[in-house]
């Protein structure tokens, strides 16, 4: 996958994309929307983990002989879990920073 074209994306292009996304979806940008997205991410990660476990069981039972499909399922689950943990760590870091602020 070639991502070299992404290096020239300006902040104005990103802002325009965000504005277009917000106006077309009409969704609320409050805490509820963020919480819903976080829960969807956790659910998606769980689904990937379950799919990888199922692929491992199918391979162990001899019902699947494709090591490629097994590896792809495991890598999807691993990457999703790493991303979820990274987001969680940033949220905890932001929470701690907010709690340490003096009023």
Image (cartoon, grey):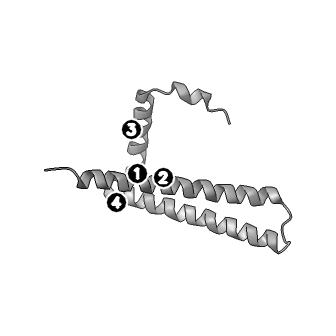
Depth check, front residue: 96 or 71: 96
Distance from label 1 to label 2 (Cα)? Answer: 6 Å
- Sequence-wise, the earlier of marks 4 and 3 is 3
Distance from label 1 to label 3 (Cα)? Answer: 25 Å
Q: Secondary structure at mark 2?
A: helix
Depth check, front residue: 54 or 99: 99
* Front of the two marks 2 and 3: 2
CA neighbours of label 2 inside 10 A, class few (<14), some (14 to 19), many (20+)? few
Mark 2 near mark 3, Cβ–Cβ under 8 Å? Answer: no
Q: Position of residue 75 (x, y in %)?
A: 67, 55
Depth check, front residue: 27 or 6: 6
Q: Which mark is residue 32?
A: 4
Distance from label 4 to label 3 (Cα)? Answer: 19 Å
Observer able to see residue 61: yes
Q: Position of residue 74 (x, y in %)?
A: 69, 59
Depth check, front residue: 42 or 56: 56
Q: Which residue is mark 1?
A: 90
Mark 1 near mark 2, Cβ–Cβ under 8 Å? Answer: yes
């Amino acid at each position: 996958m070639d991502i070299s074209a992404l290096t020239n994306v300006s902040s104005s292009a990103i802002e325009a994309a965000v504005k277009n996304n917000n106006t077309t979806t009409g969704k609320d940008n409050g805490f509820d929307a963020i919480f819903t997205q976080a829960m969807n991410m956790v659910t998606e990660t769980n689904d990937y983990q379950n799919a990888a476990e199922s692929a491992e069981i199918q391979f162990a039972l001899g019902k699947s002989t494709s090591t490629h499909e097994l590896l792809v399922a495991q890598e999807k689950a691993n990457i999703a879990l790493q991303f979820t943990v990274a987001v969680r760590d940033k949220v905890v870091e932001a929470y701690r920073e907010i709690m340490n602020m003096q009023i």
